Image (tube, helix red, strand yellow):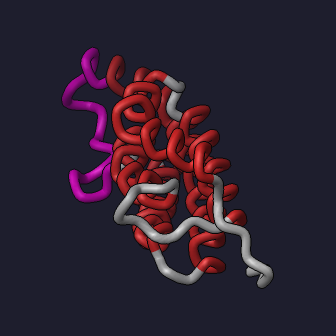
Amino acid sequence: NRRVRHEGAMSRLVSDVLASAAPLLEYSDVRVRRLAAEVCTHALHAVASIDACLKPEEGVYETVKRLHPHDVPETHAEEKKPARLLPQVHKLWPHLVASLGARLGPSLHPEPFKASLQLLVVMARVSGGQFIARRVCCDLWGNLARVLRTGVQHSSETP
């Protein structure tokens, strides 16, 4: 029970990091955008790992709770529930779309663009792919196709 609470606290902490870093994907400074994409990538890996650890526990907990409803304590108060992976991906999505070439998003530069593409790959892997597939087709493919046609601006200054 204590381990489950610690996993919940860790997932909420990583969720807060993700929520803080996600808007920085749209920041004007190229270095900040690149680092924000890297932070989001690591945070998504962490949320996915914690989520995977909690899934088997939930099934056991629910079964025991169903069999002995008065003998099993609550593991989490409502405000201390662990952060789940798919809602985190959903919250991150609009910021990632903007960083990958949305018309109103920041100007594209190679390093943050590459880091955002790597974030997209991680997002697809940890979420199982299907969760992202429709969103890529509807929200992102037009931007990516335009970027592929026009290219990404290269600068002489490396961020």
User: Which residue is pictured at 52% across the width and 39% down the height?
Assistant: 145
Residue 117 in view (yes/no)? yes
Residue 8 x, y percent position in the rendering? 44, 52
Say whether residue 147 is magenta.
no
Estimate the x, y position of residue 89 in percent, counting from the top left. Answer: 42, 45
* Residue at 51% across, 45% down: 146
Residue occupying the point 47% across, 77% down: 27
10 relative to 62 in the view: left or right? right
* Displayed quadrant of residue 70: top left
Q: How many marks?
A: 0
6 w.r.t. 62: above or below: below
Q: Nearer the viewer, residue 22 or 5?
A: 22
Q: Where is 107 relative to 58, above or below?
A: below
Q: Is residue 4 left or right of residue 154?
A: left
Residue 21 in view of the camera: no
- Between 47 and 96, the one lying in front of the other is 96
Q: What's the magenta bit mostly, secondary-structure-wise?
A: loop
Q: Position of residue 94 (x, y in %)?
A: 36, 53
Residue 77 lies in the magenta stretch:
yes
Residue displayed at 69% across by 56% down: 114
Q: Which residues are magenta?
A: 65-81
Q: Nearer the viewer, residue 139 or 151?
A: 151
Quadrant the N terminus occupies: top left
Answer with left or right where residue 92 lies relative to residue 158.
Answer: left
On screen, residue 115 above or below 35: above
* Residue that lies at the very extreme toward the front in this rendered image: 150
Residue 86: x and y, percent?
Answer: 40, 38
